[in-house]
Image: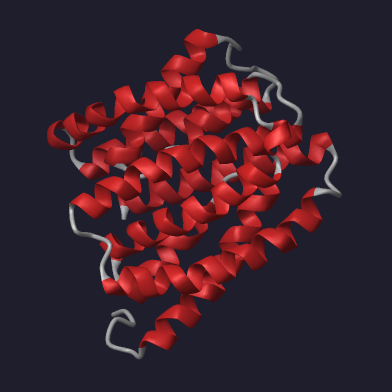
Amino acid sequence: MHLLDDPVWVVALVSAGIFVVAGAAQAVSGFGLALAAVPLLTWVVGPEQAVAVAVVVGVVVTARGWAQHRSEVDPARVRRLTGWAVLGLPLGLVAVTLMSTRALAVLIAVTVLLLVVALASGVRLPAGRPAERVAGAVSGALLTSTAMNGPPLVLVLDGAGLEKRSFRATLQAVFCLHDVMAMAAFAVLGLLTTTVLVASGGGVVGVLVGWWLGDLVFEQLSPTTFRRLVLGGLVVASLAALAGALA
């Protein structure tokens, strides 16, 4: 069951509360908005519309983060990761037709877990354009196949050894451009319904409050603690995806 039949103010209010938590997670770690929001939003508006709401709200919060910290953004990496993501978008559609959603989710979760173990052991993905091209293309494919486009971006930027502020700011820029592309696709497909817009309106208010709260925590983090949070977030994301696929 979900709250689609409840008054619009209930949908907006519940969505706002969900995105306070999701916005704080995004501010602290640089990612995690959809991970925190979509499972809870499913109970509010249903799974398909939950993804659309997360994308719409994601455009707002990542655009704000990008603008607020634009001096910390690495524009060359943003261009490469976004450009190669465009090439990966159709690959995700092909994967959906050839693999079951469950098989694809298991493959993604196991792969990310292995990469997290490597990173936690001190191994880094090679810095440079080849790794960024692969990460960009994979993230584009994941965007259209599973909506989990964050892990490859997080891993390649972590491997590049970016300072934590540059890491977060660059991620926001890339996420924003990815979400804009996804939102355009949703609009073409007619998925930006009245319910999505109502929930998104509440979500925008909540996510801005959540980002403000998370930003206060972020400023107090040491580089070591920040790295642990990033790796921990990837572990949680992978385990959640794996559990969902095996359920």
Q: Residue furthest left?
A: 97
Q: Residue furthest bottom?
A: 7
Q: Which quadrant holds the C terminus?
A: bottom left
Q: How many marks?
A: 0
> Quick check: can you spot residue 52?
yes
Query: Which one is in front, 150 or 166?
Result: 166
Query: Which one is in front, 60 or 130?
Result: 60
Which quadrant holds residue 120?
top right
Q: Seen in the image, is 30 located left or right of residue 96?
A: right
Percent from the top left, x then y, of residue 139? Answer: 40, 31
Tell me what residue is drawn at x 30 percent, y 64 percent: 49
Tell me what residue is drawn at x 36 percent, y 31 percent: 140
Q: Seen in the image, is 175 located left or right of residue 166?
A: left
Indicate whether 208 appears above or below 150: below
Which quadrant holds residue 200?
bottom left
Indicate whether 22 appears above or below 9: above
Query: Which one is in front, 156 or 81?
Result: 81
**Visual colour scheme:** secondary structure
Percent from the top left, x then y, of residue 41? Answer: 40, 68
Percent from the top left, x then y, of residue 188? Answer: 20, 50
Q: Which quadrant holds the N terminus?
A: bottom left
Q: Seen in the image, is 89 located left or right of residue 111?
A: left
Percent from the top left, x then y, of residue 154? Answer: 56, 32
Tell me what residue is drawn at x 83 percent, y 45 percent: 221
